[in-house]
Image: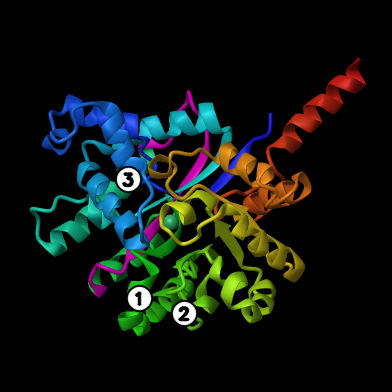
Amino acid sequence: MALYAELHRHLGGSVVPRVLWRYLQRNESDLIDRFTHYPEFEDFYTRPRNTLDEYLELHTLVEGVQTADALPYFIYRLMRGAYIFENLAYLELRYTPFLRTDPTLTQSERIDQMAQIVDIVGKASQLKEYPIVSSQILCMHSRLPYEVNRALVDLAAQSRDYVCGIDLAGGDAHYAERLDEFVELYAYARSLDLNTTGHLYETTDGHYPDLLPYLMRIGHGIQIPLHHPHLLKEVARRQQCLEVCPTTYLKTGTLQDIRQLKQVFNLCFEAGVDIAICTDNAGLNDVRLPFEYETLLTQDVIGFEELQACQDAAFRHAFAWRYAQRPASLLNRILMTDATAS
Ligand SMILES: [Zn+2]
């Protein structure tokens, strides 16, 4: 069995529709009042949106539900699904802790509560029955004030047992007016020796060459090969890995056809830029990682050799995978020992 690494998955968007539906039913939430049956809800939850902003609206729905009390419920189901259906050996889970804090508190009280959220997520994702090496990426958010994002970077630095890096999310069209702030925050994060990724070059609005040098990995980055290929050389030189999440681009209207990704993969391979294939929002997108792999193969976007190169790259660029090799090497060793013994 091949075991995979997932580098780009949002805690909010990972909730599969049936788990969310059951949770809302059990808690008699009025959020489902307008749906008479589950299929209507699933259709609403997973159908494609016209823009990234519309798509991100759905995150708000889940974030509101994922309170401190409810997080273990969702994380347990997320880890179980990732282990049973996706063969994940490694998972980086990303989210904005502030958006899971109690909204009735003041901003500074909510900032204080962020550490508790990180702790809850960290503990809930360590399950003996579904063992996956996992860590958290904390997402700065374009809708949140500077103080909150700064506190998030500090929290990441203080929580290295549970946190492996930071990210910037909230739609890449919205960084422009506060670009200096985000550059400063990334520089600060790097000065604290934190690993960095960021949602950049996801849509055509996400072109921020000033932020690029601070990233160790690029969340999406598909617009670099598509529209700014001259940047590929420096991306390769900095050994930055693209986190490509194929289904998202169709759900957000960023791409019309998955085969448009062929150019992304081809140009990156030619330039020596690594790609990790990821799901982004496995629940909202209604896909699991092996399905993303299979779709890229059946649509002739990549071949098996390229797929394996991307799977290797995912482990190489994983912030909290501390081993030189993929877990398959363990199986190879066991098989070789068995062969020698017989
Ligand atoms: Zn994302």
- Can residue 115 be seen here? The reply is no
Amino acid type, residue under disc 2 in the picture:
Tyr
Q: Position of residue 244 (x, y in %)?
A: 56, 57
Amino acid type, residue under disc 1 in the picture:
Tyr
Q: Front-most of 219 and 228? A: 228
Mark 2 vs ligand 1: CB below 8 Å: no
- The residue carrying mark 1 is 175
Mark 3 vs ligand 1: CB below 8 Å: no
Quadrant housing the N terminus:
top right
**Do labels 1 and 2 touch, CB within 8 Å?**
yes
Q: Quadrant of ligand 1?
A: bottom left
User: Looking at the image, is mark 1 or mark 3 nearer the viewer?
Assistant: 1
In the image, 14: left or right of 319? Answer: left
Magenta highlight range: 124-146
Amino acid type, residue under disc 3 in the picture:
Asp
Q: Position of residue 212 (x, y in %)?
A: 52, 76
Q: Circle 2: is it few (<14), some (14-19), or many (20+) Cα within 10 Å?
A: some
- The residue carrying mark 3 is 119
Q: Residue at x 14, y 58 (%)?
A: 109
Q: Is 238 rendered above or below residue 7?
A: below
